[in-house]
Image (cartoon, grey):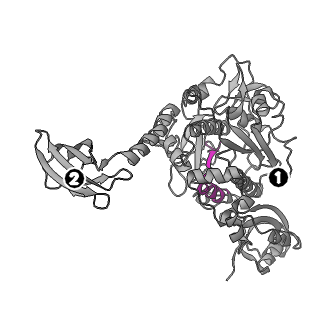
């Protein structure tokens, strides 16, 4: 049975012809088996290489939406298609409520989800909030050498650069509101001249050029990609970049979330590792589309759903928490998604910036995840000038660039492993808060943790191991590759043997519950090789 999710059912005939927005979900896709059997028809080789490196599955979600379905939707009376999503197998449409409801009669339409649920309708008090209000309040001054030093050194991204990890070989997609003059600003000349600007696309106007758009994205990009000697160097000056416009600054409508998901899908198909999103969505021009707090559970909004698909596909999404700390308060979407590394803002002294949106999400998770400098952050503007801006919009790219540089050190690391390392390397990991999340990361510490993964993997492959330690009842022996049996001996501190037994890779548990509490030496011998461990018996 087909399901229709309709957020607003009105009896007033005068509203029947008003314009509504909705997601239209399709029942299936064509040629799925052929596409999966020949993945180069739907993904680039770079995308296949990244997915193979990380063990990311290629599945039906990677297959494009059936073009004939999209065409037939476009041909329906009064319907305009604005975006499509292969991950969700859907299109984003606008039309009258009646015309949208009629789409369910098409054989390939499975579900319709209106964006206007009107469950907690409350008209805006003073119009739609300008999400870039804080960022656009700029303090223009003349800067000396090391302008960006504080924001880079605060998270020890400079240590990564000293180790020659600048993001080289890592592809980053920046999803924003526009990137005017990027190809002519001197601070981006290294990226341009070295061919590391891989492509651009405007998902709002459906064109390659990004001219005559908001300068917000240019400033955001500078905190990652710029090299302006003596003025500002970003946190991933060696990475390669795709620039995508998904934000329409002329209006605020949930279609922008659909554009954003489209951009993620393109990024994934091109082999992107890291994305930066300095955008967030909570209130709209039409207040009936607003996301209330209960929607911000990381699973409900279009953006959150798309983010979780992107994370599942192997990308690491870095996203600003938002600038609503003194207003709505909580992080907007997609910052609420569990598949996103959400970044809040601190000032130059590492104190919480009051405008930074906070958590928890409505389902109780810690957000933001981490913090970076977003108050008086150095940026390059659309005319090449360097100045200070405020906003989590700049904390996010500072973090995203550091993540890209870190990933260069060990590209086989999965996105989930890398995200967790960044959290664990943060100043408040043991005691997170709703305003600061897990705190400010130290990327020198994160690099050491990342490199330890190689050591751990080597030991697992080539050495014996024992766990848990301390032990109470059973001691388990882990075997290196190609060894199937060994002898385990336990000695007490007096050098007396208290236990000797055979173990194998299929029978590797040894009961020690009857031993007295204390310290023991475990010796595991096989093929003339012995590994010794100090064991604590509880």
Q: Residues within 10 Å of mark 1 (few under 14, many from 20)?
A: some
Q: State if disc 1 and disc 2 touch (CB < 8 Å).
A: no
Which residue is rendered at x = 83% and y = 34% of the image? 183
Bounds of the magenta segment: 303-325
Which residue is rendered at x = 61% and y = 60% of the image? 295
Magenta segment includes 318: yes
- Residue 284: % across, % down: 74, 54
Q: Is residue 497 above or below residue 225?
A: below
Q: Is residue 486 left or right of residue 328?
A: left
Q: Is residue 444 left or right of residue 337?
A: left
Relative depth, front residue between 227 and 342: 227
Relative depth, front residue between 465 and 110: 465
For label 1, the residue is: 204
The answer to which quarter of the image holds residue 196 is: top right
The answer to which quarter of the image holds residue 238 is: top right
Magenta segment includes 61: no
Identify the image quadrant of the N terminus. Answer: bottom right
- Residue 20: % across, % down: 80, 66
Nearest to the eye among marks 2 and 1: give it: 2
For label 2, the residue is: 472
């Amino acid at each position: 049975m087909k399901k229709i999710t309709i957020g607003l059912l009105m009896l007033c005939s005068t509203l029947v012809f008003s314009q509504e927005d909705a997601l239209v979900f399709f029942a299936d896709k064509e040629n799925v088996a052929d596409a999966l059997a020949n993945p180069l028809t739907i993904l680039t080789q770079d995308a296949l290489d990244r997915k193979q490196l990380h063990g990311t599955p290629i599945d039906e979600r990677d297959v494009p939406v059936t073009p004939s379905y999209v065409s037939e939707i476009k041909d329906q009376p009064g319907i305009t298609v604005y975006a499509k999503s292969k991950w969700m197998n859907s299109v984003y449409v606008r039309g009258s409520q009646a015309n949208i409801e009629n789409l369910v009669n098409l054989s390939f339409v499975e579900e319709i989800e209106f964006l206007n649920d009107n469950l907690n309708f409350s008209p805006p008090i003073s119009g739609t909030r300008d999400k870039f209000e804080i960022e656009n309040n700029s303090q223009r001054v003349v800067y000396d050498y090391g302008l960006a030093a504080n924001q880079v050194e605060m998270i020890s991204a400079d240590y990564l650069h000293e180790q020659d990890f600048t993001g080289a070989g890592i592809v980053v997609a920046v999803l924003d509101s526009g990137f005017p003059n990027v190809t002519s600003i001197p601070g981006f000349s290294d990226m341009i001249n070295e061919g590391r600007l891989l492509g651009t696309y405007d998902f709002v106007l459906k064109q390659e050029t990004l001219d005559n758009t908001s300068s917000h994205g240019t400033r955001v990009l500078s905190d990652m990609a710029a090299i302006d000697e003596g003025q500002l160097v970003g946190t991933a000056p060696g990475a390669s970049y795709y620039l995508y416009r998904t934000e329409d600054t002329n209006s605020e409508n949930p279609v922008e979330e659909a554009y954003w998901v489209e951009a993620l899908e393109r990024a994934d198909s091109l082999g992107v590792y890291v994305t930066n999103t300095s955008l967030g969505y909570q209130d709209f021009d039409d207040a009936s589309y607003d996301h209330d707090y209960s929607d911000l559970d990381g699973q409900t909004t279009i953006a959150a759903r798309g983010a979780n698909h992107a994370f599942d596909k192997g990308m690491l999404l870095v996203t600003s928490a938002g600038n609503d700390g003194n207003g709505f308060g909580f992080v907007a979407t997609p910052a609420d998604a569990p598949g996103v590394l959400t970044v809040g803002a601190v000032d130059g002294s590492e104190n919480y910036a009051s405008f930074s949106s906070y958590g928890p999400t409505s389902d109780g998770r810690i957000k933001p995840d981490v913090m970076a400098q977003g108050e008086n952050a150095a940026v390059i503007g659309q005319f090449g000038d360097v100045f200070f801006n405020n906003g989590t919009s700049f904390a996010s790219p500072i973090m995203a660039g550091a993540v890209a540089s870190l990933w260069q050190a060990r590209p086989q690391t999965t996105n989930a492993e890398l995200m967790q390392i960044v959290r664990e390397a943060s100043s408040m990991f043991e005691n997170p808060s709703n305003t600061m999340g897990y705190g400010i990361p130290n990327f020198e510490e994160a690099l050491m943790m990342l490199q330890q993964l190689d050591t751990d993997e080597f030991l697992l492959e080539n050495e014996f191991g024992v766990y848990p330690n301390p032990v109470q009842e059973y001691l388990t022996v882990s075997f290196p590759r190609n060894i199937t049996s060994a002898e385990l001996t336990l000695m007490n501190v007096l050098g007396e043997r208290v236990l000797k037994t055979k173990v194998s890779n299929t029978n590797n548990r040894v009961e020690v519950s009857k031993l007295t509490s204390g310290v023991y030496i475990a010796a595991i011998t096989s093929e003339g090789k012995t590994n010794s461990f100090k064991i604590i018996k509880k």
